[in-house]
Amino acid sequence: MQGLRVHITGIVQGVGFRPFVYNLATRLKLTGWVKNTSAGVEIEVDGKKDILDIFVQKLRDEAPALSSIDEFSASFRPASGFSSFDIRHSESVDGAFQPISPDVSICPDCLRELFDPSDRRYHYPFINCTNCGPRFTIIKDIPYDRPKTTMAGFPLCPDCEREYTDPTNRRFHAQPVACAVCGPKVWLESGSQVEGQRSLSGDDAIAETRRLLSDGKILAIKGLGGFHLACDATNEKAVTELRNRKLRVDKPFALMMPDIQTVEQHCFVSDAERELLQSTARPIVLLKKKPESTIVEEVSPRQDWLGVMLPYTPLHYLLFTDHYPLFTALVLTSGNLSEEPIATDNDDARKRLSKLADAFLMHDRDIHIRCDDSVVRVLEVGKLGNGRLVPNSQSTDLPIYPIRRSRGYSPFPVKLPFDVPQLLAAGSELKNTFCITNGNYAFLSHHIGDMENYETLRSFEQGVEHFEKLFRVKPEAIACDLHPNYLASIYASERAERENLPLFQIQHHHAHIAACMAEHRLNEPVIGVSFDGTGYGEDGAIWGGEFLVGDYKSFQRAAHLEYFPLPGGDAAIRKPARTALALLWSLGLEWDERLDSVAEFSTEDLVVLNAQLERKINTPMTSSMGRLFDAAAALAGVRQKVNYEGQAAIEFEALADPAEAGMYSFGVESGLVGVRGVVEALVKDAAAGISIQKISARFHNGLAESVRETVAKISTETEIRSIVLSGGVWQNITLIGRTLALLKKDGFKVYIHREVPTNDGGLSLGQAAIASTRLRG
Ligand SMILES: [Zn+2]
Ligand SMILES: [Zn+2]
């Protein structure tokens, strides 16, 4: 007889790990115990040496699908003389922490039970088990046990209790376990616009919700991480009404479709996309729309793709139940007004969404932390890195390109290439996420949103507090963007001063490159190509077309897009025609009335704009690639005003003719990517009536070529062969596809984002990596 002690860390709680250990140990006739602690899972067993070896092997090989083992240590010791195998009570270890599982979509077993009339949870909208259900959004503290979740207020009925305490049951220690007798309930409330609506509950509430949706009504539906606003996606009137009420112009809405067959009726779906849609994270996947799709144009105006997800909660499945095939696709957009945070609390939703929704499908399981749907796309470009984003063993090699990393992924950590101090990185202004570090883990937050109002700032502060508590972090330093006026930067500097902590203000594009380096565990100098809309530069200008050489510690600006003036700053962002005219002015090119961008202004406005440029009134200089895209789209005649950031560039890309091989020359010189050549050629083409499709392709081709030339020059000087692409402009699939092809042909090693977004949603990871390196000196 021999004793064995095992310690396992990683995602091993809330994923059925203890019952797995229990069943394995009893099958092998071992005695001892297993328990959760805030530091992981501890196991002690007695048995014959060769059986213990098998036990260790099987612990690793047969671990539950949702678990993810980071560290595994096993050591022999004398036998303790245990007489049985037990599951012991969880224990809190001072200062210790564990990664926490993201929320997990309903599993096949629960789905079968949901639609089995003989099952006691038939049509129960909150059915779940150890393999599925809410996690992150209901957890208040660790170790993960029911009293520390928002399920604490639902005492188990005898039937659920029996399942919960039976180690051979699928619901053994499934913390959110519940049934219609003891668990949360759904009900329907009338909004302001459906008169005399009775309050219904259970199946009746869901059936009435379906009827209202098929009748063209807009419903607020409480989900896993917050409220959604829903309507029939094939009903033009309903979708237009939703846009009007939400004050959201043009920006695409996400869709939910009942099954993969329906998705394939509306969109082209590759194998990788199918796998991603069906993965347990159930993100919104961006897919090419089929011409015959009946989804109304108003869902995603002037774009050739749709953001689609499959149902991920039992309630969603009930909404689509085939007894009532009333609609094939729902718009499911976040329950908020324009840029506010998504509503999570019932009272808050009643208050904030009453003018937006005709009725509310409510429930009483509280959402402790809001979590928006994730958005990803598949980017297949040969063997480039891998898709580690999906936190379970099922889909680790998917070529994922994240756009928004939130529900289903957060708070799964990114593992850093080195141990780091405890830090908080506050992130950016737009698409904010923050990041806290502990050990070699970087815990990137869920999507917080655009930090432009008090509500979002509050949501940010609550999120930071929650993460620091969950992962037992007391920051030794704080990192933020170099821009002093970002709300996240103000929070960071005030807190650093109050708590007497070092503050690291990190240049925006350096953080982008470091984020991509960190997720690929790179720890060597690279050439970073950081293209985006706006980032505060070290010289006070607005940067955004940057070629950096450096590592985590520091960087040099090896080259950048030629500066041009941005009259009115934000006004130019809303009106690309202003940027277009400023660009012409700075190059000494004529404001030709035949150009759409010029025709957009009255003669008086042109005089005012000219004076503003001459006198440099509120006209910052910029090297922003995002703004160059805006200007090019405006000059080509795509659009002169935008309703959301990046709209002109997105529509410009959608028009690019894939068969066009011509290109505009950017004129790459030492340290500078010129704009004269491209603007002159583009204006000439536009005046000659060349199609926007060709102009767009020539612009994209030329830009990719200019990246290749610039990178080649820098590489010759520095002998660096590793290239990192990061920044929001790289969401442009046409541009990144062409650039990657060129750089790979030249034999460079190219890294793109696979775990965190290439846009500002990934910035805080880079800030954390840089600050930790600087803190260690
Ligand atoms: Zn399940
Ligand atoms: Zn029950």
Image (cartoon, grey):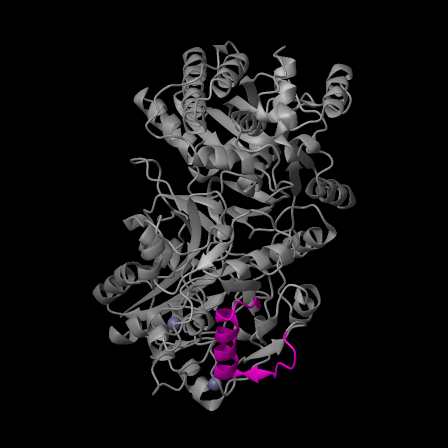
Q: Position of residue 103 (x, y in %)?
A: 47, 62
Q: Position of residue 547 (x, y in %)?
A: 51, 21
Q: Is residue 433 visible?
A: yes
Quadrant of the rendered image containing residue 387: top left
For the C terminus, which image quadrant? top right
Q: Position of residue 88 (x, y in %)?
A: 45, 75
Q: Is residue 73 visible?
A: no
Quadrant of the rendered image containing residue 187: bottom right
Residue 162 is one of the magenta-drawn residues? no
State left or right for residue 197 relative to residue 612: left
**Residue bounds of the magenta highlight:** 194-219
Residue at x 78% of width, y 45% of height: 498
Q: Depth check: give the residue in front, 230 or 733.
A: 230
For the N terminus, which image quadrant? bottom left
The image quadrant where one finds ligand 1 is bottom left
Q: Depth check: give the residue in front, 267 or 541.
A: 267
Residue positioned most to the left: 50
Q: Depth check: give the residue in front, 102 or 351.
A: 351
Q: Depth check: give the residue in front, 252 or 594.
A: 594
